[in-house]
Image (spheres, rainbow, N blue to C red):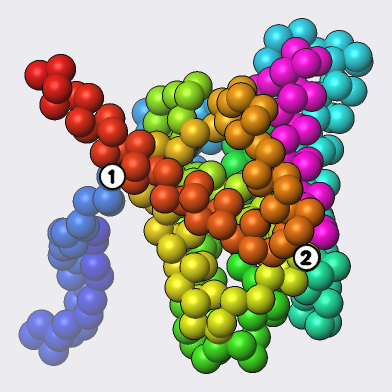
Amino acid sequence: MTVAFDRIRNGRPEVETVDMVIPVSPAPAGAATMSGNRPAAGTRPAGADDLDAPIPQTIPLLPGEHTVARRIKFGLANACTLASIMLGMSAVFISMHGDPRLAAMLLLGCVIFDGVDGAVARKMGVASPFGAQMDSLADMCSFGIAAPVVLYAALHGQAPALLIAIACGMIAAGAAIRLARFNVSPKDGRFFSGVPTTMTAAVMALSVLIGLKLPGLLAVVAVAVLAIAMVSGFPYAKLSRIARLPLWLFAAPVAGLLVAPQLTFAVGVALYVISGPLLWLRQRGQHAAAV
């Protein structure tokens, strides 16, 4: 740039001009120009690639054809799952108001709906991965959370509260571990791997409903053993296999239920829990003999 300034020479003022060069730092890459603050040619605003990327879409919940009839059937199957969740939450609220027996009846309703939703989905041809995940989440809500809360309310005052809370917490943790393992494990049509969460919840609900009276510490130990059996790898026979046993084997349990229902129920549960380790030992012995 050119700068003019005055100076005195030989007693007379004169004007002298001087050319000056002022260095200018280069503009950073991608910076906007002064004209309209628009980006320079050939540059794209930051985040342009993100804006142009397609918005991710969720997968269809119902696989196959989306007819009105199939949507209704799909909704009916999942309504059974939601009913299990609502009954479980109701059981929690009712047990907090001091009525664990009514809460136990609602838990038995959860057990019924847990068996119905899958059967309805398969019968109507609307079984889906979404339904399977919903069923697992409902089991955690009803059998992993509601059932131990109801049991805690029923056992409150019969043993130290801390011990009861620990045992019931073990049930919740065992249910979470077992359900997660079930989702990623291959299925066996003959045996369960560990005691199922549904069966554990049914045992706890029936114990409260029939008024099973165990000494406080023994009750806490029994709950802890159930929690451990849930996450164990011991094989437990499915009820469908037990139902195929000869009818004469059921004569003693039926008679016992008529005479001493509480004692018969406790003995039956204990035998089932013990059957897992016994089957495991038998399978190991057979494998060793085959080798």
Q: Is residue 268 left or right of residue 226?
A: right
Residue at 25% from the left image edge and 70% from the top image edge:
4
In the rendered structure, which amino acid carries the disc numbered 2? Answer: Leu
Left or right, 156 with respect to 270, comes to: right
Query: Which residue lies most toward the top here?
Result: 65
Q: Secondary structure at mark 2?
A: helix
Where on the picture, by quarter, is residue 41? top left
Q: Quadrant of residue 99?
A: bottom right
Q: Quadrant of the C terminus?
A: top left
Q: Quadrant of the N terminus?
A: bottom left
Front residue (pair 210, 12): 210
Q: Nearer the viewer, residue 165 or 22?
A: 165
Write down the quadrant of residue 66 in the picture. top right
Say how many tags the image has: 2
Q: Residue at x 69, y 79 (%)?
A: 153
Q: Would you say residue 203 is visible in this rendering?
A: yes
Residue 117 forms part of the magenta stretch:
yes
| Mark 1 burial class by Cα count in 10 Å: few <14, some 14-19, many 20+ | few
Q: Position of residue 176 (x, y in %)?
A: 49, 53
Identify residue type, mark 1.
Ala
**Image position of 155 with respect to 85: above or below:** below
Mark 1 near mark 2, Cβ–Cβ under 8 Å? no
For the question of whether residue 56 can be seen, the reply is: no
Give the residue displayed 83% in from the left and 82% down from the top.
97
Please name which of the two marks, 1 or 2, marks the residue nearer to the observer: 2
Secondary structure at numbered mark 1: loop
Cα–Cα span, label 1 and label 2: 75 Å
Magenta: main secondary structure equals helix
Q: Which mark is residue 29?
A: 1
Residues in magenta? 104-129
Q: Which residue is mark 2?
A: 209
